[in-house]
Image (spheres, coloured by chain):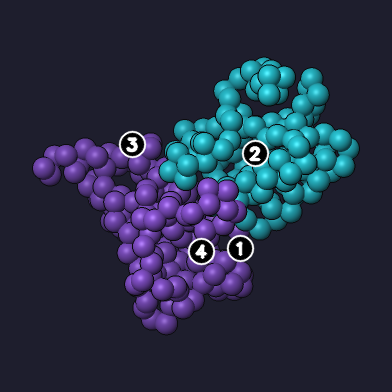
Amino acid sequence: MRIELSFPSEHMFLGVPDAVIQEVGSELPFSQTELDELSTSVIEACTNAIEHGNALVADLPARVRLDFTANRFQVTVYDNGKGFDFETRDFSVFPKDVLQERGRGLYMMYSFCDELSFSRENGGFAVTMVKIPKGASESAG
Amino acid sequence: MKIKERRRDGVVVLELSGKVMGGPDSELFSSTLKQLLHEGHSRVIVDLGRVTWVNSTGLGILISGYSTLKRNEGEMKLLNVSDRIESIFMVTKLYSVFESFKDEGEAIASFATD
């Protein structure tokens, strides 16, 4: 099943995708921890989308597509920006300085998602995050 | 994000509520701490019990506050960190930086033993 939404590139709307994920996820076999981890990752992606991709231009919407089943919750966030050099970045590397004030968002996304991917499409940039409920992965063997 | 401030036993408790993220939150938190330091208060507890979520920029705001107080020989400790925020602290290793409590009395008492 799919839900698509878009919101203006303003911080006040960052809670919208979180609310949708929590609401939809509550009907699926995900633990609260799994939902929170996915939500946290999506909020990071949306933050990057509005701040970097869309440069906080309110008229430029951030778009979010949620595709979900009982065994998989996939969220893709789209913005109008050029993205970054994801092809050469290693997201598994923890930021050098624990106390640095920025630069830990991608690491958080990498840590919390079962799958994380990036792409350039239609002149913009997309981040796709996937969460698979533990029960589903165990039953799949 | 909203901030409610109260004082107890020489310690300032800042109750944050809502979402801690980028944008105007940064200036609000920063100016609140600056005002406290100006008034001579450097022992601060940040109560996150009513915070819905924090993004990485919000973490940066807390870290900036922590560093500002440290530079001024003060201390910032956390109270009522939810499971959701605690998992972020674990992944980002910030649990090794921030002292965290579930009880306000214990948090306040900890300043006396520092």
Ranked by sequence position, the earlier of labels 1 and 3 is 1
Q: What element does badge 4 sit on?
A: helix
Question: What residue would you read off at disc 3?
Answer: A31
User: What is the chain identity of the residue bearing mark 4?
Assistant: A
- Left or right for B67, reference A60: right
In the current view of this chain or complex, which residue is farthest to the right? B39
- What chain is the purple one? A
Please state if B101 lies on the left or on the right of B14 as rendered.
Answer: left
- Label located before the other in sequence (1 or 4): 1
1 or 4: mark nearer the eye: 4
Which labelled disc corresponds to residue B37? none
Which chain letter matches label 1?
Answer: A
**How far is mark 2 from mark 1, CA to CA?**
19 Å
Q: Position of residue A58 (x, y in %)?
A: 61, 70
Mark 4–mark 3 Cα distance, whole angstroms, equals 26 Å
Dividing the picture into quadrants, the one containing residue A129 is bottom left
Residue B58 appears in view: no
In the rendered image, what is the letter of the chain coloured cyan? B
Q: Which residue is mark 2?
A: B17
Instruction: From the image, state whether disc 2 or disc 4 is nearer to you.
Output: 4
Q: Which mark is residue A48?
A: 4
Indicate the amino acid at tag 3.
Ser
Instruction: Determine the CA span between mark 1 and mark 4.
Output: 11 Å
The amino acid type of the residue labelled 2 equals Ser
**Residue A10: mark:** 1
Residue A41 spot, x, y in % from top left: 43, 52
Report in which chain the residue with disc 2 lies. Answer: B
Instruction: Using the rendered image of the protein, determine whether residue A82 is visible from the camera's viewpoint.
Output: yes
* Label 3 environment density (alpha carbons within 10 Å; few <14, some 14–19, many ≥20): some
